[in-house]
Each structure stands twice: as structure tokens, then as C-alpha cells.
Amino acid sequence: QAQLVESGGGLVQAGGSLRLTCSAPGRVFSRAAMAWFRQAPGKEREFVTRISRNGRSTVYVDSVKGRFTISRDNAKNTVYLQMNSLKPEDTAVYFCAARSTILTDYTNYTSLSDFSDWGQGTQVTVSS
């Protein structure tokens, strides 16, 4: 399992913004669709967003549409999650995930089992 490293979490007031970063080994990142999941206390880990290997396709869970943006920099082997207009219900540990796939695969992978490589997570806390 490849090592993915998340950063950028923290404590922010409702309405604020954070940008999460996930770095992956080049051998993994260059061949992978990337995603963010989150897990709130006492809840199951849930899908947040996914970006295709070539960056041309993204998908979001309804609760974050219009507020979160996923992007990737293939030169830096890094995926980002820009989170704006944060709400207390966004409080969770956010995990980065990778799935090896072909360049033009636009499948909406949204299940935990769709992804083989995971980071350790970064805590995001939104105060009201």
C-alpha cells in the first residue's frame, strides 16, 4: 500500500475556508484517480469527492457541491481539496485515497472498496 500524506487540517469558524493537500508517490499518483473521504465521530467513512486521473472529471457528494473543489497538480503528485463556506457538520477526519486506473476512466468511484491506497487522515474541526 502506497503512502499518501494529508495536511492542511485545523480548526476554523463556520463560514471559513481550509485547503487540504495530499501528496503521493509519483508511481502511484500518475496512474490514479484520487478522492477525498471523511469520517465524523461515531459515523462511517463517507465519500466526499473524486477527480479522474487526467483531471477532467470530478464528482461531489451533494452536501459539499458549490462549496468544495477538488483539483490535482500532476507535476507535484498532489491533490487538493479547497473547502469554502465550512459548516459544523463538515467536522471530520478527512482521508485521501487513490485508485489505479486508465487515463480516460471517468467512472464515478465513490465506495471505500474502489480505492486501494489511503492516507492517515487530517482533522478538520468547524466551530459554530
Image (cartoon, rainbow, N blue to C red):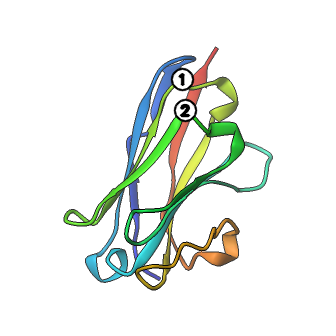
Q: Quadrant of residue 55?
A: bottom left
Q: Position of residue 63 (x, y in %)?
A: 70, 38
User: Reading the chain from its start, which is encountered first: label 1 or label 2?
Assistant: 2
Q: Position of residue 57 (x, y in %)?
A: 49, 62
Q: Is residue 52 above or below residue 92?
A: below
Element under disc 1: loop
> Mark 1 touching mark 2, by CB under 8 A?
yes
Q: Which residue is mark 1?
A: 85
Q: Is residue 8 above or below residue 125?
A: below
Q: Quadrant of residue 10?
A: top left
Q: Which labelled disc corresponds to residue 47?
A: none
Q: Is residue 100 above or below residue 65?
A: below
Q: Position of residue 111 (x, y in %)?
A: 70, 68
Element under disc 2: loop
Q: Which labelled disc corresponds to residue 67?
A: 2
Determine crowd level at label 2: few under 14, some 14-19, many 20+ residues with C-alpha closer than 10 A. few
**Residue at x 56% of width, y 79% of height:** 116
What amino acid is at disc 1?
A: Ser
**Residue at x 43% of width, y 76% of height:** 32
Q: Quadrant of residue 45?
A: bottom right
**Residue at x 48% of width, y 64% of height:** 119
